[in-house]
Amino acid sequence: MSATPQPRRDIRRRSCLVLVALALLAPTACGYGSQRARGSGPAAVAPGSRKLSADTVRIGYFPNLTHMTALAGEQEGFFQRELGGTKAEYVAFDAGPTEIEALNAGSVDIGWIGPSPAINGYTRSGGKSLRIISGSASGGVKLVVNPKKIKSLEDVKGKRIATPQLGNTQDVAFLNWIADQGWKVDAQSGKGDVSVVRTDNKITPDAYKAGSIDGAWVPEPTASKLVAEGANVLLDEADLWPGQRFVITQVIVSQRFLKKHADVVEAVLRGSVQTNAWIRSHPAEAKLAVNRALGSAGGSPLPRAVLDRAWSSVEPLNDPLAATLREEAAHAVRTGLLEHPDLNGIYDLRPLDRVLRDLGRPAVSDAGLGIGQEAR
């Protein structure tokens, strides 16, 4: 779906405006992601806990509110309690293609990720690298713009709009929206009737303040950070989808890890389902927990106004909304980032089905794209 992914940048503090402008043009490499927990964090392994089939499971996620399940699950210890004596280690990423690289390299076993990188990773490996094993969230993506330069959707033409990374979920969604307007943009270079500027979410607010971009199609909390800097929400992506629901975050696993450590995978999914239930039933506490996790992963917690605005647009769920993944793959084909993918087998929802069945909940659909149909 994308060209070779750009490595993640390590931005320690806000740069001055000149450096921000330069940073937009010159990405630098610094590994797969920032590892957070080798025995640290809010939930350590309890002494004497029974170990599952693996000593450790490495879990990837982004410091975005759209990954609230992973953030809250780590912060409140839901994953570690289910894992018992198997240690959970966490690795933070800024965009999906980089996380797929880490999964392929064995640096991550299970990850929270958007649909486009998952599709890309699966198809480029010939269906051998990963499986989608659960949903996690819907919503939480917006087109936010400088109101002095852009007052209507038509005004987006000719402007500089940021997306997080070439081929990531928001990049594909924005390119598809551009095509819906009848405008032309070269997907690889981002040049055309709109300038698509691939920009790390961490520096997008500074780029906006510097005037290097006129807006951004981004996930939360980046969208609400821009609003705090004076931007306006021009479009909520949920409004483009039937029922205002679309998959924004799902859970993937390395096929190698799933085959060797199915018990560990099922334990993580139990933690995920429990976390989503807790978020829905304890929204105030969940909001604080996720903000603490964002502070640990991203450097500082969100201001209350930013957190409140961003929180309301993200829905945690277990359903992978598989039909919308199929549609997002069609968007990538339309924009020239993917060639007619074969998605058969991309889902293995059997571990999730077992977790849901134990809780008396119905199975969820893989839209005909799963394996093991006879067992479901």
Image (tube, rainbow, N blue to C red):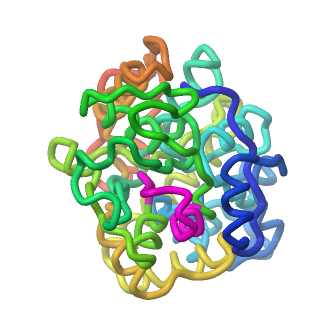
Residue that appears at 49% across and 25% down: 186
Residue 80 image position (x, y, % from top left): 65, 66
- Residue 127 visible in this rendered orientation of the protein: yes
Residue 276 image position (x, y, % from top left): 40, 64
Membership of 209 in magenta stretch: yes
Name the residue nearer the viewer: 172 or 56. 172
Q: Quadrant of the N terminus?
A: top right
Magenta-drawn segment: 204-219
Of all residues, the one furthest to the left in this rendering is 243
Residue that appears at 57% across and 45% down: 198
Residue 151 image position (x, y, % from top left): 24, 60
Q: Is residue 278 left or right of residue 296?
A: left
Residue that appears at 67% across and 58% down: 21
Q: Is residue 351 above or below residue 272?
A: above
- Residue 375 visible in this rendered orientation of the protein: no
> How many numbered circles are shown?
0
Residue 68 image position (x, y, % from top left): 47, 65
Q: Is residue 272 left or right of residue 242?
A: right
Q: Is residue 346 above or below residue 9?
A: above
Residue that appears at 25% across and 31% down: 180
Q: Is residue 64 above or below residue 94?
A: below
Q: Quadrant of the C terminus?
A: top left
Q: Is residue 241 above or below residue 49?
A: above
Name the residue nearer the viewer: 179 or 113. 179
Name the residue nearer the viewer: 190 or 38. 190
